[in-house]
Image (cartoon, coloured by chain):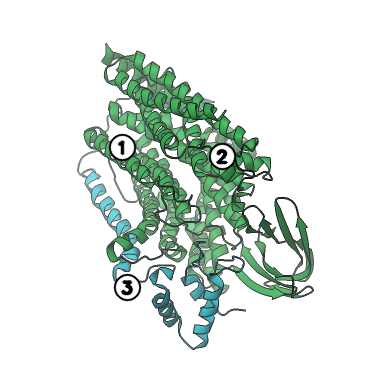
Chain colours: A cyan, B green
Amino acid sequence: MKNATQTEIEEALTCQCGCGLTVHSCNHVQCPSGIPLKQEIATQLGEGKTRAEVLTYFATKYGEKILSAPTTTGFNLVAWVTPFAAVLAAGAVIVVVSRRWRRPPSAPPDSRPAPIDDARRARLEAELDRFDA
Amino acid sequence: MVDLGLLSLRLALIGGLYAVLAAIYGAVARRPAYARSARQAAYAVHALVAVAALVLWRALVTRDFSLEYVASYASSTLSLPYRIAALWGGQAGSLLFWALILTTMSTVVHLQNRERNAALMPYVTATLMAIAAFFLGLLVFMTSPFERLPVPAAEGADLNPLLQNYWMLIHPPALYLGYVGCSVPFAFAIAALATGRLGDVWIRTTRRWTLFAWFFLTLGNMLGARWAYEELGWGGYWAWDPVENAAFMPWLSCTAFLHSVMIQEKKNMLKMWNMVLVLLTFCLTIFGTFLTRSGVVSSVHSFTQSGLGPFFVAFLLSVIAVVAGLVVWRRPLLRGENEIDSFLSREAAFLFNNLLLVGIAFATFWGTVFPVISEAVRGIKITVGPPFFNKVNAPLGLALLFMTGVGPVIAWRRASARNLRRSFAVPLGVGFATGAAIFASGWRNYYAVVCFSLAVFVLATIFMEFYRGTRARQALMGEPAPRALANLVGKNRRRYGGYVIHVGVVMVFVGVAASSAFRLEEQETIRKGDVVQVGAFTLTYQDIHFTEDAHYSSMLAEIAVAKNGAPVGTLFPEKRFYKKQQQPTTEVALRSTLAEDLYLVLGSYDDATGLMTMIVFVNPLVNWLWIGGLVMVLGTVIVMSPTAAEQRALAAALAVEERGLEAALR
């Protein structure tokens, strides 16, 4: 039975065997990377280190690429912020543009029927047919 | 025989290039004879590619190990279905398979449009054949499937054991049909831009093709997830691997297009945006292919480093250049009658739905390429793995789920207070009640609580639509309830088929949320007779069995399963060892119910000590993910099935277009 911190750290590290999964998810038989890493995590936790300290230890020892997600400092913040910034910016664009698309409220609604083209007439007839059916 | 394959590919390349030139010349110089000739050439290219594929299939089936491809991806003990599937198991074969699907679709498109779309078709021919020529060029000059070995091999290296799973037979073809299907709407979009015929016709003509592509993209993604779930043995189904992302992104942009195109059809809005989405979807399919074959990002799916990357980049860049040029040139014609009266309207809801779909696609793209960006900027390689994608996409996904409930029922133009009350009071009520009930019962996983509440909200809006529609028909037509319901769906297939798809989407969300938030997991090393308790399950390790044949050896653990003390059966998690590739695979044992999956993995077994390591997962509600996928597929079938009214609308639009064309030519 593992404790929660161990699992959390396993999830935060990438297995180096090429499976592309986190250390926690890799289940290769006798994985040359995953199994020693799991033991190393346990040893580090056994020394009384916190989650953050253990992760720092691994990043220092194996390089930053062992972390399964970018850190939240420095340039790596760009990774985290950009998707939300892009969605918010695009949302703002939608709001601004569609305000411009809004018809002036003072203009009286056009009460004359719009001229109807063939496609629409066909659709209208089809819908009327369906209604009669 | 092999020479026939080689010759066919070369002739097909020449034919494809000829078709591109003849079609464009025919259109520009108004010489219909050349356009017709290009069409014939396209048929010939299809036939030649089919011959090449048959030759390769024959070589695989007859185990012709004088071919490098066959020797690399098949073996004497590989069974027939996998020898057939080996056509898409390796680099060159899968490119040939791609070309086969593309040219087949080209033939279908040409047959469908023999008598119509005379103005668009030459450019459609040119576009489809240009794409085909790119793939054929790779096959002829870069990576031939018909390469001979200097000395025929005595035995083949075999197909990668992970691919020797029945999903291999249908997952790649489904995904490829989806990928390549996106080429058809793309070709019509290019034709519409080139001719300036940016009205209704190209959109209506390609609607079913877009749905077809979406259908197979959905199916392909789902089958891929299922494959991972059964074959990789880590208890999950989606690892945000670059190649999974590559299949997911075009699905997202295609989904966005299918929604926003309705706004164009109804309100003549968003012409430019729809054009961008069609083009983006196609570019994402090419980008996905590039990812799998370039080795730029590491992935479990990567074909071995092949040196094809630069060609895909060049192709992608030229596509983007052509597309951008055409769009800028035609910008005046792409102005729609954009009008939004209120943010509380269906138009606005669809805009935000598009924002979220494309936002998720962008976040996924961003995470996939960020390692490359990081290395370029800081010189440090980093990993962007599942935790990143889950954290970033979960809030966006939940917002999207909310919009799934809002979009289809909010009123056009401006929702009145009455419309809002009528459509949303009850669903919001039951949604909140669900959330409160779950929270009160002690669950504190906020994402899951929000997800379940939203799921109930969306289902309630959909249920009310069906209920009110059925009641209205009962009252108006005097039909009994079952017939009223059947007619309601049958006469409005797009709308109610769409609701069915949404029900599937809700199921997928529920399955994903429950199985990621409340999964139980246990790893135990045990001896015969030992008992493991996981949640409600009691597992007794009874025995281990060994079997062996020429292809692989296998061990199966016999595990007696009891739930809440009552025996429910025996499971056999298996470990195989494939002899040719010297590689083990896990074959998980599943006990699947609507409530949860019990998922057993045989980790390892030590003969000397008799110790067996078993990994146990209990994945709650995960079955709803697969059922949801099936429901989405079923809904798409309903949406796709033709209705007379729709045929008439297309015929009318075409008639207008043809009349204009005749006038122009006169």
Labels 3 & 2 near each other (Cβ < 8 A): no
Q: Amino acid at mark 1?
A: Lys
Q: Pointer 2: what residue?
A: B87
Q: Which residue is mark 1?
A: B271
Is the residue B569 above or below the residue B531 in the image?
above
**Chain under callout 1:** B
Q: Nearer the viewer, mark 1 or mark 2?
A: 2
User: Whole-percent x and y of residue A109?
Assistant: 25, 37
> Mark 3: which secondary structure?
loop
State the separation of the CA atoms marked 3 and 2.
46 Å
Residue bearing the label numbered 3: A73
Query: Looking at the picture, which amino acid does disc 3 mark?
Result: Thr
Q: Are marks 1 and 2 in contact (CB under 8 Å)?
A: no
Secondary structure beneath dot 1 equals: helix
Specify few, some or many for label 3: CA neighbours under 10 Å numbering under 14, 14-19, or 20 or more: few
In this view, B464 is above or below A1: above
Task: Return the x and y of residue A77 as percentages of the image width and height.
Answer: 32, 68
- Which residue is found at the position 57% from the left and 30% from the top? B55
Report x, y in % for residue B563.
74, 68
Does residue A19 show up? yes
Q: Identify the amino acid type marked 2.
A: Leu
Quarter of the image with the C terminus of chain A in it: top right
Q: Tags 1 and 3 in contact by the CB under 8 Å rule?
A: no
Q: Which mark is residue B155?
A: none
In this rendered view, identify the residue nearer to me: B500 or A47: A47
Chain letter of the residue carrying label 3: A
Query: On the image, which quarter does residue B554 sit in?
Result: bottom right
